[in-house]
Image: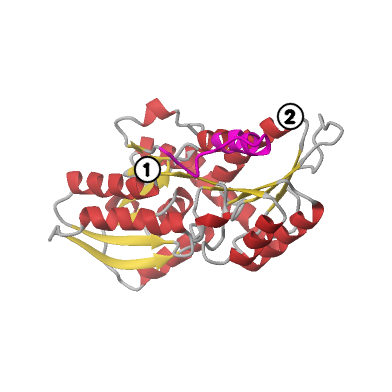
């Protein structure tokens, strides 16, 4: 069973794009600093997601950008490219530039305490999206998917379809969201004698790391028939590795995001399931929180956005060619 040409082409192009991005990682501004509708006395909003190699963050940021531009304010976006030290440096520079609000997805949930204390001292509002920071007292609002439930849904789906399975888990330990997804999965399959976790493989949720890691695991002779992936970039990396080794039809892949590429694989029967996140909803919640905070309104300190299981039976409902 082979991945269709279109899907494999997109995987290869994604790898090439990632490689190019890594050459210029981190310091580029990914959107113009100044809104076309900028008003006099406009406010500056800063955004720092853990990486821009994941389309999830592009979709999320689009929602914020549209609102900021409509308000006549300015948005600056920096890409730390999974480097905690770079993220700290970039946030520091944004604080120097006078941002009023910081939108943040932490590279490392434990590594931003000092810079967030500085933001707090400067009166900057902080909104965390997608993955928590360890000290939530330093932020005004956290907006995330129900990451633990996402892992549980995939665990339940695996148990519904298999009495016995050898499972590989792709992880990202530095991200709270990644840890919660894995824990939800493990808690759900735990105690079922026929289900065995044979290996945990760190991949930072990145396609270009997951693919060679999976190829190495296969070449070592590790036996497995299921792969739990903390997100869809890692699931695409797993799929590409299995394809290169002629094993794609022998292993079930489970991911989280329900990205267009993952939904295409599900539609083609090349991937078992993915849990849908809704980046547009997270972005809308974040945009609303920005302006509620700037207007002095109260906002919820924690907002959880629901997730949904996507399988071959319902994938067409979620529009295969675009994010939900």
| Between discs 1 and 2, the one toward the N terminus | 2
Q: Are marks 1 and 2 in contact (CB under 8 Å)?
A: no
**Residue named by callout 1:** 274
Image x and y of residue 33, in percent? 80, 43
Please count the marks in the image.
2
Residue 266 in magenta?
no
- Looking at the image, is 226 positioned above or below residue 266? below
Image x and y of residue 70, in percent? 72, 27
Kindly report the distance in space between the C-alpha atoms of the residues bearing marks 1 and 2: 36 Å
Location of residue 153 (image quadrant): top left
Q: Is residue 241 visible?
A: no
**Residue named by callout 2:** 71
In this rendering, position of residue 166 left or right of residue 81: left
Q: For the view shown, which residue lies furthest in the right direction? A: 40
Q: Secondary structure at mark 2?
A: loop
On residue 322, the disc is none
The boundaries of the magenta stretch are 285-305
Asked whether 29 or 289 is in front, the reply is 289
Image x and y of residue 236, in percent? 45, 51
Residue located 54% across and 38% down the image: 299
Give the crowd class for mark 1: few <14, some 14-19, many >=20 residues within 10 Å.
many
- Which callout, 1 or 2, points to the residue nearer the camera? 2
Location of residue 177 (image quadrant): bottom left
Asked whether 244 or 129 is in front, the reply is 129
Q: Secondary structure at mark 1?
A: strand
Image x and y of residue 71, in percent? 73, 29
């Amino acid at each position: 069973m082979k991945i269709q040409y279109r899907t494999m082409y997109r995987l290869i192009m994604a790898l090439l794009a990632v490689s190019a991005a890594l050459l210029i990682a981190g310091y580029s501004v990914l959107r113009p600093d100044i809104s076309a509708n900028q008003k006099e006395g406009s406010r500056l909003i800063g955004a720092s997601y853990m990486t821009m190699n994941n389309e999830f963050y592009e979709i999320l940021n689009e929602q914020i950008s549209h609102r900021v531009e409509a308000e006549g304010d300015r948005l600056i976006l920096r890409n730390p490219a999974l480097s905690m030290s770079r993220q700290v440096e970039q946030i520091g520079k944004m604080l120097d530039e006078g941002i009023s609000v910081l939108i943040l997805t932490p590279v490392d949930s434990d590594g931003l305490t000092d810079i967030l204390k500085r933001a707090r001292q400067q009166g900057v509002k902080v909104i965390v999206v997608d993955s928590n920071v360890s000290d939530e007292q330093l932020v005004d609002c956290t907006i995330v998917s129900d990451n633990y439930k996402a892992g549980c849904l995939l665990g339940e789906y695996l148990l519904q379809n298999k009495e016995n399975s050898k499972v590989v888990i792709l992880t990202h330990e530095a991200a709270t969201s990644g840890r919660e997804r894995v824990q939800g999965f493990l808690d759900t399959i735990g105690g079922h004698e026929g289900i065995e976790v044979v290996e945990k493989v760190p991949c930072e949720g990145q396609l270009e790391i997951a693919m060679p890691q999976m190829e190495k695991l296969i070449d070592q002779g590790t036996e497995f028939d299921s792969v739990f992936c903390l997100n869809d970039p890692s699931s695409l990396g797993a799929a590409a590795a299995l394809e290169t080794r002629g094993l794609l039809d022998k292993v079930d892949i489970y991911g989280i995001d329900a990205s267009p590429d993952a939904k295409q694989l599900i539609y083609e029967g090349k991937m078992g399931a993915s849990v849908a996140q809704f980046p547009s909803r997270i972005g809308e919640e974040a945009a609303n929180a920005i302006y509620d905070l700037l207007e002095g309104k109260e906002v919820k300190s924690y907002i959880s956005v629901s997730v949904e299981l996507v399988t071959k039976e319902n994938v067409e409902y979620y529009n295969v060619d675009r994010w939900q």
